Amino acid sequence: MPVDAKPETLDVVVVGAGFSGLYLLHWLRKDGFAVHVIEAGDDVGGTWYWNRYPGARCDIMSLDYSMSFDPQLQQEWHWPERYSAQPDILVYARHIAERFDLRRDISFGVKVTAATFDEGSDRWTVEGDDGRRWNARHVIMATGCLSVPRIPDVPGLEDFRGDWYHTGDWPHEGVDFTGKKVAVIGTGSSGIQSIPVIAQQAAELTVFQRTPNFSVPAWNGPMDPAFEAEHKAHYDELREVTRWSAGGYLVEDNNDPARHLPREEIEAELERRWQQGGFSLLGAYGDIMTDLEINAIVVDFVHGKIREKVKDPAVAELLCPKDHPFGTKRLCVDTGYYETYNRDNVSLVDIRKAPIETITPTGIRTAQAEHDFDVIVFATGFDAMTGAILNVDFKGRQGASLREKWAHGPRSYLGLMVSGFPNLFTVTGPQSPSVLANVITAIEQHVEWICDCINHMRDRQLSHIEARKDAEDKWVDHVIALGDATLYPQANSWYMGANIPGKPRVFMPYVGGCGTYRKVCDQVAAENYRGFELAS
């Protein structure tokens, strides 16, 4: 389509065809809106389309990590495992697209590059990298929080004669590591998931670790038919519980403090929850994330588990996180991660002590040694929360740039809208619960709120909605104050933008919990969208 061709006129443009984009399309189309989804990938699935690395799976139990908007769908769908693997989640996303005939309103293989707001018409013009343009009243960014892979700026990568990959942009045909000498750089969630699987196939695996991360066992296994049947029999009640819970998933949360309990009692409860697996450990006591002394007991407990699992004491010590409190970086959920370091073909390199200096044609050179590899895997994470949004050149009122507005950190009202950028919504954006919650629960809440808002505007013949600056400032201050009352800012995490050189160090998620956040958003809407300016 020529650049100067007339843009397609719509009510809503949605960017991204993951679960949020699919749900938005289904809801808005059902309500009679002209809506189109633009997706960079060649199919639906979002993060589960791109993240195909070995061992990729969800860290929320399958029966929670699924859409609740269609009762028949949730009753009929069967998850084969307690924690679903990436291929199963991708099949599920494709099934949703087919079941609700969504693909006919999605443009695949198109990256949105720019969007400009016209104050005369209260409409956005959206541009794709293929020259196509769309004109819409509303733009909704459904691009996900972890969708822009971060490849470190390491000298020499272009000279490497082997193959290299990033876990967040994995080849769809897969990778065969048989007989290969493999390096994995990074021990965040994708590294912790992929390392045990790669180790089973590679001739040699060397893990390059700068910062060890806390990981808890998933105790994953086949879905128990009796458990599944019981869960589905009470799905409506259980879903309602998760919607108003802190994390948006079913977990045994205890809000009582541990401060005055005997250490032996605390450790016994931690052991019980360790045996449950998953994020249960985080919910053991209400002060784990606010009281450093209580958190230190959890740290000691997990360190003890690592030392039990890893036979070499020196390796075990390297794997014990000691520079941040428990849970202040994204807690990982693993299957056999620590035990992998007992394998004869696996070694660990501490790049905090001996940093990587360069990629060589045959491998990696650190400050202490040179290593030869056939394959390098970058498990180095993402430009989280803001990366995908800022990849689009947004121009709002008077040509204001969103990149410039967010130069010192993201600013939004409720994590939903940005002052100066009318009719632009973000799903699970910065300053919402997003990454601190079951993202499916967060997605459904955001999508439903946004769709209700757009319907509200149509019913009243309103042309724009915009966050007021005073409301935005107050919300940002509130989010930062909540974060500062916890231990989260004590870690150099991607929650803080610390994994991206030059990115502002600002704590981005809302820590008040899904249920509290839902209540705030509902109250805002009930009070005629308090904090927003609406006009015809």
Image (cartoon, helix red, strand yellow):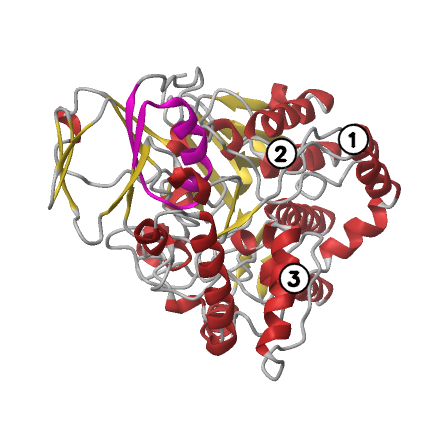
Q: Which mark is residue 130?
A: none
Query: x%, y% of residue 167?
Result: 39, 32
> Mark 2 highlights which residue?
84
**In the foreground, 522 or 161:** 161
Disc 2 residue type? Ser
Q: Which residues are magenta?
A: 180-206
Q: Which mark is residue 246?
A: 3
* Residue 419 seen in this snapshot: no
Q: Which mark is residue 73?
A: 1
Q: Label 1 crowding class (10 Å Cα cut-off): few <14, some 14-19, many 20+?
A: some
Q: Nearer the viewer, mark 1 or mark 2?
A: 2
Tell whether 94 sits left or right of 241. left
* Residue 275 seen in this snapshot: yes
Lower sequence index among marks 2 and 3: 2
Compared to 461, does 531 lie above or below?
below
Snapshot quadrant of residue 181: top left
**In the foreground, 364 or 465:** 364
Secondary structure beneath dot 2 equals loop
Disc 3 residue type? Ala
Secondary structure beneath dot 3 equals loop
**Could you tell me how far apart the alpha carbons at marks 2 and 3 are, in whole angstroms?**
22 Å
- Circles 1 and 3 in contact, beta carbons < 8 Å: no
